[in-house]
Image (spheres, helix red, strand yellow):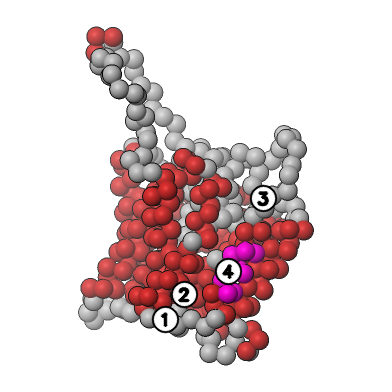
């Protein structure tokens, strides 16, 4: 998902050129806000996504929350595509892979998180989302032949899952914990990891821009939910304002605008710095759930979350490598392609999020997902 090629600009006659400015030149493409401000906004949006899901499910069925989220997210990305005059991907094969990616990275995990939060607090959902890099590294050892584990990364994997057991209170026999809801949230994070590996293996080198692929993928996920939702839900008898606003914010901000923010941050400061948003998401999700929803925390939840994040950080370390050419036949994902969480990023690929999100990392975008899961 390489950036869209700039449109050729016709030469301007000397007589039509403006007089030189006395001040220093300014970059026309420079974002109006500092990247740190946009980074903070991205962390807040994805961190609050779990709260939005929780509030949304108070007025709508889980599938309806997911459908609304995807619909409003698609609308934002569609506007961005029109403004940038970007074009949709071409080729039946690309669209087939995008359909699978839409299911693994959008339709399935978004729905699983929505169902999970019927029975578990948003704080726990946010922490489960942070396990995506752990699942990603575990899967990449099997699915990606170029990925080689190191002792540090293997230790990070073990530490991370110890953190998961701490969050769940395994020594208490998981008492007071809804096993089904927790399993659904962990399965959603696992789906992100599978999805990023699939994207890495199938959607590299398509020639389409990140925005084009992202908008198309989210649009396909919307169509998938448009088919499924009427089969399993009925229209609510009344529409409450707060849940409706939560779904709109979840889609327009968490699935649409957040992805646009993410593109800009990765392009400006690189995927490594952008991927740090991963570690703020569960912190913000926990703070939002406790302060705004009145959710209670046992000591093991924040302690386990810290251990999970520490393990996830260790799984992202890279062994020092000599500068060598990639092996023959290796397909190099274009800049901006997110690698699966925990997977080694080959030369030329952008380390992913974050989600993902990413809840949830939603699309084959420059999600810092060695990295993050967007919500």
Mark 1 and mark 2: span between their CA atoms?
8 Å
In the image, what residue occupies the spot 34% across and 15% down? 11
- The answer to whether 320 appears left or right of 14 in the picture is right
| Secondary structure category for the residue under label 1 | loop
In the image, what residue occupies the spot 47% across and 37% down? 3
Q: Nearer the viewer, mark 2 or mark 4?
A: 4
| Secondary structure category for the residue under label 2 | helix
| Quadrant position of the C terminus in the picture | bottom left
Tag on residue 295?
A: 1
Q: Give whichever of 79, 156 is nearer the camera.
A: 156
Q: Give whichever of 267, 72 is nearer the camera.
A: 267
Magenta residue check for 208 = no
Magenta residue check for 309 = yes
Tag on residue 306?
A: 4
Asked if the residue at tag 2 contacts the one at tag 1, i.e. Cβ–Cβ closer than 8 Å, the answer is: yes
Which residue is denoted by mark 2 in the rendering?
123
Q: Residues within 10 Å of mark 4 (few under 14, many from 20)?
A: many
Tag on residue 344?
A: 3
In the image, what residue occupies the spot 64% across and 84% down? 170
User: Of marks 2 and 4, which one's residue comes earlier in the chain?
Assistant: 2
Residue farthest to the front, as pictured: 23
């Amino acid at each position: 998902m390489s950036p869209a090629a700039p449109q050729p600009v016709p030469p301007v006659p000397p007589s039509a050129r403006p007089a030189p400015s006395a001040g220093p030149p300014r970059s026309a493409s420079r974002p109006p806000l500092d990247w740190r401000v946009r980074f903070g906004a991205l962390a807040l949006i994805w961190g609050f996504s779990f709260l939005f899901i929780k509030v949304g499910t108070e007025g709508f069925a889980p599938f309806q929350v997911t459908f609304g989220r995807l619909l409003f997210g698609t609308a934002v990305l569609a506007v961005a595509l029109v403004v940038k005059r970007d074009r949709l991907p071409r080729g039946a094969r690309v669209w087939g892979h995008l359909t699978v990616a839409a299911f693994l990275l959008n339709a399935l995990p978004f729905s699983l998180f929505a169902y999970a939060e019927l029975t578990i607090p948003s704080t726990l959902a946010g922490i489960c989302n942070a396990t995506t890099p752990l699942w990603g590294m575990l899967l990449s050892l099997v699915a990606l032949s170029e990925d080689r584990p190191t002792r540090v990364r293997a230790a990070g994997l073990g530490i991370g899952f110890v953190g998961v057991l701490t969050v769940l209170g395994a020594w208490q026999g998981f008492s007071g914990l809804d096993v089904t809801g927790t399993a659904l949230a962990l399965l959603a994070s696992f789906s992100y990891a599978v999805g990023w590996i699939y994207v890495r293996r199938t959607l590299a080198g398509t020639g389409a821009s990140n925005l084009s692929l992202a908008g198309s993928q989210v649009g396909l996920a919307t169509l998938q939910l448009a088919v499924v939702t009427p089969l399993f839900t009925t229209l609510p008898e009344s529409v409450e304002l707060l849940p409706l606003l939560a779904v709109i914010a979840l889609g327009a901000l968490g699935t649409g605008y957040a992805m646009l923010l993410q593109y800009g941050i990765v392009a400006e400061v690189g995927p490594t710095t952008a991927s740090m948003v991963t570690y703020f998401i569960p912190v913000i999700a926990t703070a939002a759930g406790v302060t705004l929803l009145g959710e209670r925390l046992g000591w093991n939840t924040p302690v386990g979350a810290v251990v999970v994040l520490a393990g996830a950080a260790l799984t992202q370390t890279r062994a020092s490598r000599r500068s060598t050419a990639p092996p023959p036949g290796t397909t190099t994902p274009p800049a901006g392609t997110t690698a699966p969480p925990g997977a080694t990023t080959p030369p030329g690929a952008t380390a992913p999020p974050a989600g993902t999100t990413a809840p949830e990392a939603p699309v084959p975008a420059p999600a810092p997902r060695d990295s993050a899961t967007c919500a």
